[in-house]
Amino acid sequence: MKKFFVQFLLLFVSFCFFTYISCTKSSVENKLQGKWKYVNVENFYDTTYVEDWEFKSGGELIIHYRDLQWMGNPDTVVEYKGFYSMDSYEKFTVSGIENPHLPYYNCQWEIVKMNNNILMIVNNVEGGLYFREFSML
């Protein structure tokens, strides 16, 4: 009887753990979905830089990016499409973004902070930290 109880308890704890992890990961993905506006923390008054990230259901990611330096037209916002997938409740991977001006985007990002209005993410590519902060639109 004692052996059965220990096996049952181990199975129950394992089930609860995996249920918690999977629910947490999906709830983070649900919070992540939507359109996020880039906040230029280096210069709050710079309104020319546009970089909005839109996380859609099904793993689609659209980055709305103003190619000011390269196109010359300040009203031109280009969409770069790619994909994202949740690796854990605090990490996601971006892939398929084809833009040479955004070279450090196709990688794994770590969520530093996320609530209803704020998203802070960072990656560690090429030996340095690449930081992005957003507010929900």
Image (cartoon, rainbow, N blue to C red):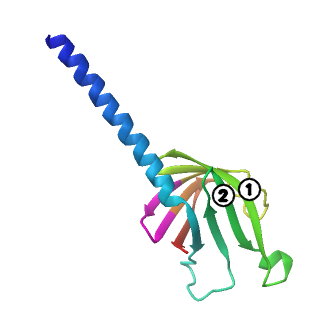
Residue at left offset 27%, top offset 30%: 13
**The C terminus lies in quadrant:** bottom right
**Relative side of 77 to 91, left or right:** right
Which quadrant does the N terminus fall into? top left
Residue 50, given in percent of the width and then of the height, sits at 67, 77
Marks 1 and 2 in Cβ contact (< 8 Å): yes
Q: Position of residue 125 (x, y in %)?
A: 62, 53
Which numbered dot is residue 97? Answer: 1
Under tag 1, what secondary structure? loop
- Mark 1 or mark 2: which comes first in sequence? 2
Residue 95 x/y as whole percent: 69, 50
Q: Which residue is disc 2 drawn over?
A: 61
On screen, residue 3 versus residue 53, left or right, reads: left
Q: Which residues are magenta?
A: 110-120
The answer to whether residue 116 is seen in the rendering is: yes
Structural crowding at the residue carrying mark 1, measured as other residues with C-alpha within 10 Å and reported as few (<14), some (14–19) or many (≥20): many
Name the kind of residue labelled 1 in the image.
Ile
In the figure, 66 relative to 5: above or below?
below
Residue 107 higher or lower than 1, as above or below:
below
